Image (cartoon, rainbow, N blue to C red):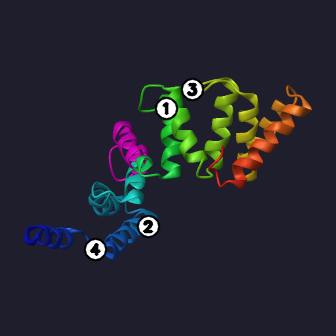
């Protein structure tokens, strides 16, 4: 028991103070806002290495754009993936897009659909719209016009204006019964807080 208590005390003492991490992140974010990318990188990199999700995402952006560091697609993908794996919806959407467009990774529609779905289930309208396109075209998922319509409807609900035109295109090739079913699917999905999609 004594050894276990000692290990717990050591672990608690070794844990970084969460407010300090937040303060450091705020300093890094302020540096980004001021265009001081060198300072931002110096502040954010250790935080990202400790698992700070926003620091990971911002490092991905910095490597993608070449802000404060040399532009590096592999490093950008690495940091986006780390943030995405922790549930960062925007990082998931970007990672999905990278798989879809073969940006910094080999093209993989299944991975694109997987990451779009994760972000879509968090209400990311861009991911919802793109997932709708994938269901319509059958890329990475089985083609399904009703599911496509559902995701477009959710994207439109969440502010993605491009989804309106996508819905109109689908409606030209759907029966009224199919449209009704797809709308019910969207209502169920939204009503369940994206648990039943």
- The residue that mark 4 highlights is 17
Residue of label 1: 111
Q: Earlier in the sequence, mark 3 or mark 1?
A: 1
Instruction: Say whether marks 3 and 1 touch (CB < 8 Å).
Output: yes
Give the number of the disc on residue 140. 3
Count of numbered labels shown in the rendering: 4
Up-down relation of residue 159 to residue 102 (above or below): below
Q: Are marks 1 and 4 in contact (CB under 8 Å)?
A: no
Badge 3 local density, few (<14 within 10 Å), some, or many (20+)?
Answer: some
Depicted 180 relative to depicted 12: above or below? above
Q: Nearer the viewer, residue 153 or 1?
A: 1
Magenta span: predominant SS is helix
Q: Please say whether residue 136 is one of the residues in the magenta stretch.
A: no
- Between marks 2 and 4, how big is the CA–CA gap? 26 Å
Q: Position of residue 139 (x, y in %)?
A: 60, 24
Mark earlier in primary sequence (2, 4): 4
């Amino acid at each position: 028991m004594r050894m276990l208590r000692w290990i717990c005390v050591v672990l608690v003492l070794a844990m970084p103070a969460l407010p300090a991490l937040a303060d450091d992140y705020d300093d890094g974010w302020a540096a980004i806002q001021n265009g001081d990318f060198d300072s931002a990188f110096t502040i954010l990199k250790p935080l990202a290495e400790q698992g700070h999700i926003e620091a990971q995402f911002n490092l991905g952006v910095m490597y993608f754009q070449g802000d404060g560091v040399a532009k590096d697609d592999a490093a950008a993908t690495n940091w986006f993936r780390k943030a995405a794996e922790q549930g960062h919806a925007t990082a998931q959407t970007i990672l999905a897009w990278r798989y879809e467009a073969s940006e910094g990774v080999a093209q993989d529609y299944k991975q694109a659909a997987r990451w779009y779905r994760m972000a879509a289930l968090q209400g990311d309208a861009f991911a919802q719209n793109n997932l709708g396109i994938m269901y319509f075209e059958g890329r990475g998922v089985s083609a399904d016009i009703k599911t496509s319509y559902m995701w477009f409807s959710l994207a439109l609900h969440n502010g993605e204006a491009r989804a309106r035109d996508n819905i109109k295109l689908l409606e030209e090739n759907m029966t009224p019964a199919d449209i009704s079913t797809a709308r019910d699917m969207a209502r169920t999905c939204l009503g369940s807080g994206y648990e039943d999609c």
